[in-house]
Amino acid sequence: VMLKKWAWSGLTRGGGASSVRGMWRGITSGAATPLISRECAGQTVTFHETLPHWIGGRKVFAEKGARTLEKRYPATGEVLCRVPVAGEATIDDAVATAHEAFKEWSALSGAERGRILGKAASFLHEAHPELARLEVLDTGKPLQEAEADMSGSDALHFYAGHASTTCVSGSHIPLGPAGFGYTRREPWGVCAGIGAWNYPNQIALFKSSPALACGNGFVFKPSEFTPMSVVKIAEILSDAGLPDGLFNVVHGDGSTGALLTTHSGVRKVSLTGSVATGKRIMAAAASTLKAVTLELGGKSPMVVFPDANIENAVRGAMMANFYTMGEVCSNGTRLLVHNDIIEEFIRQLCEKTSRIQPGDPMNPATNFGALISK
């Protein structure tokens, strides 16, 4: 998320140089859709009938007749709400407001940014029970997993501490007595993140935390399968004191991601997704020389040799194949065990798999939930 400061050359794909603040303040928002309340493992969570985007520090609802997608609960298949698909105007607005907020945010010292981000991380910790339940509705993973995973807010805490050190420090390059060389780190401007559906809360914060700590604005597109919690995260960041427009959320499918990737106002794109999508992102980003970070899926064979600690190896195999229903980047797609230990390995593996308790993801006793879709 760091590079030499760049010159802002336009606000849209066409590079038009109109007033940023005027652009995003004037965007049309449709009427707010009704709120739905749902009891989830002893706590009530709420969400809109059609989810809003989050742009400029406020909810932005799709206009009547705009294209929307169904959001289904993986555990039952029921439609929980609808997801708007952001088009060109919405993406232009999100990028423009992120750039406007970036100018204010990047002018702060690293220590000032760190204090605000640290406060936001604390707020996220406090809101974790609600965020965990929204993540279960999104992904179908067991509540016990979602409640145990606070890595997103932990990442924000981590980068809050780096905002005044690593994120701003450069280096000296010795060039001999006749010269003096140094580097300095400065923010890109507007960065975009495109998330996957297995860890929606974690990925939103893993991508945005370093970008924000380094002084950038951010636009995030969650997966259309798991869109429910990220606007809540945006509200919490806003409550902690982040400037309006610094962190924006746009919903949609691959067409929305393509608009972000090709937008002239976005200077860096980070994707977590498939290899095929990564190839398309890299090709599209090349047209505007964007920096790209890709975290892609792949094959992950697990090999167990005869001198291995079998108990530890079985634990690793269980984690690789059954944690989050195996829908993880570290999934053990193949398990290769040496013949000398195969019988004992299978015995221990069968004993542990017998303890798997599939069922209602909201039941605290369930340790194996639903797959994301059919």
Image (cartoon, grey):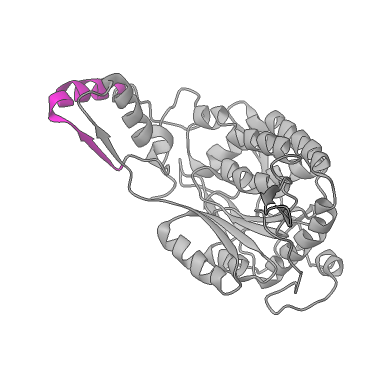
Give the mark count.
Answer: 0
Q: Where is residue 100 drawn, in percent x and y? A: 82, 61
In the picture shown, does residue 281 fall above or below 77? below
41 vs 272, nearest the viewer: 272
Q: Most prominent secondary structure in the magenta stretch?
A: helix
Residue 52 versus residue 42: which sits nearer the camera?
52
Residue 211 drawn at (x, y percent) = 68, 50
Query: Where are the magenta residues, as a range?
Result: 333-352
In the image, residue 354 above or below residue 68? above
- Left or right of residue 182, residue 338 in this image: left
Which residue shows up at 25% across the image and 20% down it? 348
Q: Tell which residue pokes out farthest to the front in this image.
A: 177
Give the vertical position of 69 relative to 313 (above or below): below
Q: Is residue 344 magenta?
A: yes
| In-image side of 151 versus 211 (left or right) | left
Whether residue 369 is in magenta: the answer is no
Name the one closer to the observer, 316 or 178: 178
Q: Residue at x 79, y 53 (%)?
A: 58
Residue 311 found in image quarter = top left
Residue at far left of view: 339
Residue 107, above or below 306 = below
Q: Does the image show residue 228?
A: no
Any part of residue 28 in sight: yes
Instruction: Give percent across and percent down for residue 180.
Output: 74, 54
Taking the spot 83% from the left edge, 41% from the top edge, the residue there is 112
> Residue at horizontal 26%, vertical 21%?
310
Viewed as shown, does residue 163 lie left or right of 108? left
